[in-house]
Image (cartoon, rainbow, N blue to C red):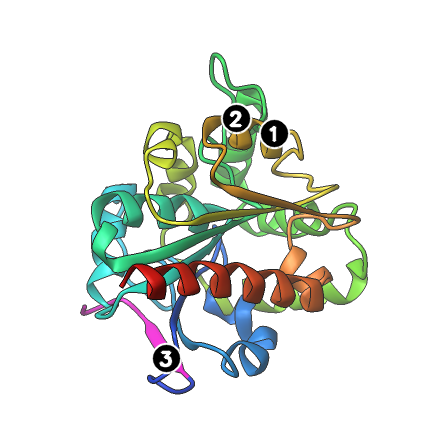
């Protein structure tokens, strides 16, 4: 689709894996993982509409974003989304179940902002304050956001440098409108997904509380959940080997199941 940056790596003969990054970032966040991932997968990275190198609009919705990213992926694939990308992956799976063989959410929350009956999320007042700060001072707020992502995580200094590099190169065009997408509530959509689902959380994530793990597990006991000890909001960067092993184990399991059923 015109205006949506996407690029594929590896052999098209391998199982397809789509990577969706988080708010304020770009697909460059996956760069260090691509050499290992392409050994097992045909990887497609996408810059979310309004972020990175993709065009966007101020009236974008999570549903319209899902329509745009789904349009650039032709074959059924496992969709992996980090943070906001995890919410988007849920929306894609809900709208296009035939395109999603499996779903992996990383440091994500189906309901990112606290609502009645859902305390395992960011405080609504904190979210509003962040939006106000972003409108007033975007550069300063993005720098603070980078620090929040590595908060508590291991190997923080090296990861912070990588995150800042991605933020500096992303030049997102629609920060405010895409930030508003985090106020969506996808709990119902997530609970109804029929594809295999894996949720990965960081033990000391400063943006998605680890209590989300048990809350999500209660929604659908068939979903797999993993918590990376000592990891913050970027478990795929702080614990890359464990992350890749977890990804391999999960995808092999549901691929074998699909083969038996097929």
Image quadrant in which you'd find residue 79: bottom left
Residue drawn 58% across and 79% down? 36
Query: Can the viewer see residue 189 in this picture?
Result: yes
- Whichever of labels 1 and 3 marks the residue nearer the N terminus, that label is 3
Query: Mark 2 sits on what residue?
Result: 218
Image quadrant in which you'd find residue 236: bottom right
- 30 vs 220, nearest the viewer: 220
Query: Mark 1 sits on what residue?
Result: 214
Report the Cα–Cα distance between label 2 and label 3: 35 Å
Q: Which mark is residue 32?
A: none
Q: Position of residue 165 (x, y in %)?
A: 61, 69
Tag 1–tag 3 contact (CB < 8 Å) = no
Magenta part of the chain: 1-9
Tag 2–tag 1 contact (CB < 8 Å) = yes
Q: Position of residue 115 (x, y in %)?
A: 47, 18
Q: Position of residue 63 (x, y in %)?
A: 24, 43
Position of the N terminus by quadrant: bottom left
- 194 vs 231, nearest the viewer: 194
Tag 2–tag 3 contact (CB < 8 Å) = no
Image-based side of 113 in relation to 151, left or right: left
**Few, some or many residues within 10 Å of mark 2 (<14, 14–19, 20+):** few
How many numbered discs? 3
- For residue 150, above or below residue 40: above
Dot 3 falls on a residue whose secondary structure is: strand
Based on the picture, tell me whether residue 64 belongs to the magenta stretch. Answer: no
Q: Which mark is residue 8?
A: 3
Image-based side of 108 in relation to 145, left or right: left
**Few, some or many residues within 10 Å of mark 3 (<14, 14–19, 20+):** some
- For residue 80, above or below residue 136: below
């Amino acid at each position: 689709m015109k205006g949506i940056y996407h690029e594929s790596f590896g052999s098209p003969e391998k199982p397809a894996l789509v990577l969706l990054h988080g708010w304020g970032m770009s697909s460059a966040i996956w760069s260090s993982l691509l050499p290992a991932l392409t050994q097992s997968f045909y990887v497609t990275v996408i810059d979310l509409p309004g972020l990175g190198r993709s065009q966007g609009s101020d009236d974008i919705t999570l549903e319209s974003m899902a329509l745009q990213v789904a349009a650039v992926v032709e074959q059924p694939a496992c969709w992996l989304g980090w943070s906001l990308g995890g919410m988007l992956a849920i929306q894609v799976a809900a709208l296009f179940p035939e395109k999603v063989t499996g779903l992996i959410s990383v440091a994500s929350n189906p309901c990112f902002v606290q609502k009645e009956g859902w305390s395992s999320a960011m405080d609504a007042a904190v979210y509003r304050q962040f939006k106000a700060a972003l409108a007033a001072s975007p550069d300063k707020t993005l720098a603070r956001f980078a620090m929040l992502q590595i908060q508590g995580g291991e190997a923080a200094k090296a990861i912070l440098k990588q995150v800042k590099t991605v933020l500096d190169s992303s030049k997102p065009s629609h920060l405010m409108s895409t930030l508003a997408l985090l106020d969506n509530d996808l709990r119902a959509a997530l609970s109804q997904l029929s594809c295999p689902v894996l949720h990965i959380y960081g033990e000391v994530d400063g943006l998605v509380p680890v209590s989300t793990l048990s809350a999500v597990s209660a929604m659908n006991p068939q979903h797999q959940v993993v918590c990376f000890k000592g990891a913050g909001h970027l478990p795929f960067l702080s614990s890359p080997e464990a992350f890749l092993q977890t990804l391999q184990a999960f995808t092999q399991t549901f691929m074998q199941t699909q083969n038996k059923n097929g």
